[in-house]
């Protein structure tokens, strides 16, 4: 036998030499859930180990994460029903707790990379990412609302805006508006290929943001399709996105690979709530080894071509990297 591939696996030191992919804590963005009030830390029932924090405790959490080497955070707000309306007006109220918290985080920790979410769902009485009229999600009318929300978040000091709404034309619309208002350094990480996925379930529990009727299939992509992701990516590049994101990650590794092979922009992947909760639940039952499963998942996403991973595993990974 001339060829014995096992020779390159014969010892840990040789395996280390031929190892192609590493995940670093530098690649990770940790999503955090924010609630109004003080001294609140409420575990999300369907996401063990993940909490909704009030601003004071979120600042402590961020400080703790920084000690572990995590410097990037994506903050999502959970709003009470009483503050939601059809046009998401709370999203650009300068006094709203979300914007105040973003401002406070940047003030206390200017060195962190702070990301925010641009979509109507946490503030919408319809629970949809866009404006609803007669049961339909209106595209162009939604852009105006997303624009106001983006300016308010940029003004609060956010480093990267994350439009997660999947309306057509929103990246270009937001980019122009940011530039016109002097926010030339505010980046956009577009949710380029965001699929209509069952794996967002626990996230919608965390934010109480599930749609009140129907589903998100007229704006989020069909899980059966890959080519559309290339159309979305072409548009995002033309419209000035700084990063392209694929979401979810695990069932869409082929899409991550395609974008990474075809576009020079950094590719991000969102390892979503359901992907975290599956592993947590199985590990709690003793059916999976949590650390090894987490490491293998993050490695697979990186190997597929994502430079950046948004993941609820961030803190556990930082404590116990592969
Ligand atoms: C909202 C948004 C969602 C997620 C991120 N931003 C949910 C959705 O589109 O319904 C999901 C994240 C996760 O599941 O971890 N536009």
Image (cartoon, rainbow, N blue to C red):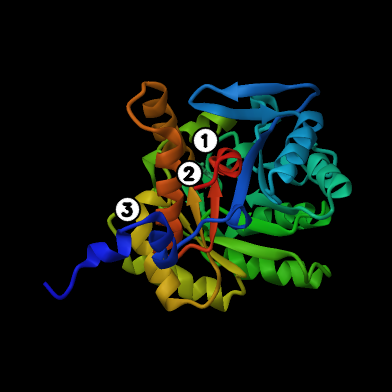
The N terminus - image quarter: bottom left
- Find residue 105 and report its image quarter: top right
Q: Is residue 221 visible?
A: no
Residue that mark 2 sits on: 272
Reply above or below: 130 against 246: above
Please name which of the two marks, 3 or 2, marks the residue nearer to the observer.
2
User: CB at mark 3 closer than 8 A to ligand 1?
Assistant: no
> As displayed, is residue 165 above or below residue 314?
below
Disc 2 beta carbon < 8 A from ligand 1?
yes
> Does the numbered disc 1 mark a residue whose Cβ is under 8 Å from ligand 1?
yes
- CA gap between label 3 and label 2 equals 15 Å
Residue linked to disc 1: 203
| Mark 1, secondary structure of its residue | helix
Q: Can you give x and y, in whole percent of width and height, for residue 238 in the image? A: 55, 78
Residue 207: image location, x then y, percent: 59, 32
Percent position of residue 283, x then y: 40, 28
Q: Which mark is residue 223?
A: 3
């Amino acid at each position: 036998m001339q060829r014995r591939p096992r020779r390159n696996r014969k010892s840990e030191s040789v395996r280390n030499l031929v190892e192609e992919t590493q995940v670093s804590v530098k690649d990770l963005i940790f999503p955090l859930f924010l609630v109004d009030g003080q001294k609140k830390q409420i575990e999300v029932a369907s996401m063990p180990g993940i909490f909704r924090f009030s601003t004071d405790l979120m600042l402590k959490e961020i400080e703790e994460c920084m000690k572990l080497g995590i410097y990037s955070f994506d903050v999502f707000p959970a709003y009470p029903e009483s503050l939601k309306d059809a046009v998401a007006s709370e999203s650009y109220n300068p006094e709203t707790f979300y914007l105040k918290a973003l401002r406070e985080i940047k003030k206390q920790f200017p060195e962190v990379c702070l990301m925010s979410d641009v979509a109507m769902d946490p503030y919408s009485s319809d629970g949809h990412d866009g404006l609803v009229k007669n049961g339909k999600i209106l595209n162009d009318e939604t852009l105006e609302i997303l624009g106001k929300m983006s300016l308010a978040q940029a003004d609060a000091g956010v480093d990267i805006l994350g439009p997660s709404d999947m309306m057509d034309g929103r990246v270009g619309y937001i980019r122009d508006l940011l530039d016109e208002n002097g926010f030339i350094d505010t980046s956009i990480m577009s949710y380029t290929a965001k699929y209509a996925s069952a794996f967002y379930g626990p996230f919608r529990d965390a934010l109480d943001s599930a749609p009140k009727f129907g589903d998100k299939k007229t704006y989020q992509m069909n899980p059966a399709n890959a080519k559309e992701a290339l159309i979305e990516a072409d548009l995002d590049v033309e419209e000035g996105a700084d990063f392209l994101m694929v979401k979810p990650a695990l069932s869409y590794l082929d899409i991550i690979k395609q974008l990474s092979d075809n576009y020079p922009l950094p590719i991000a992947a969102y390892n979503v709530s359901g992907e975290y909760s599956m592993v947590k639940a199985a590990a709690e039952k003793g059916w999976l080894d949590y650390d090894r499963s987490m490491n293998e998942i993050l490695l697979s996403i990186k190997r597929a071509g994502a430079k950046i991973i948004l993941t609820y595993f961030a803190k556990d990974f930082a404590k116990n990297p592969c």
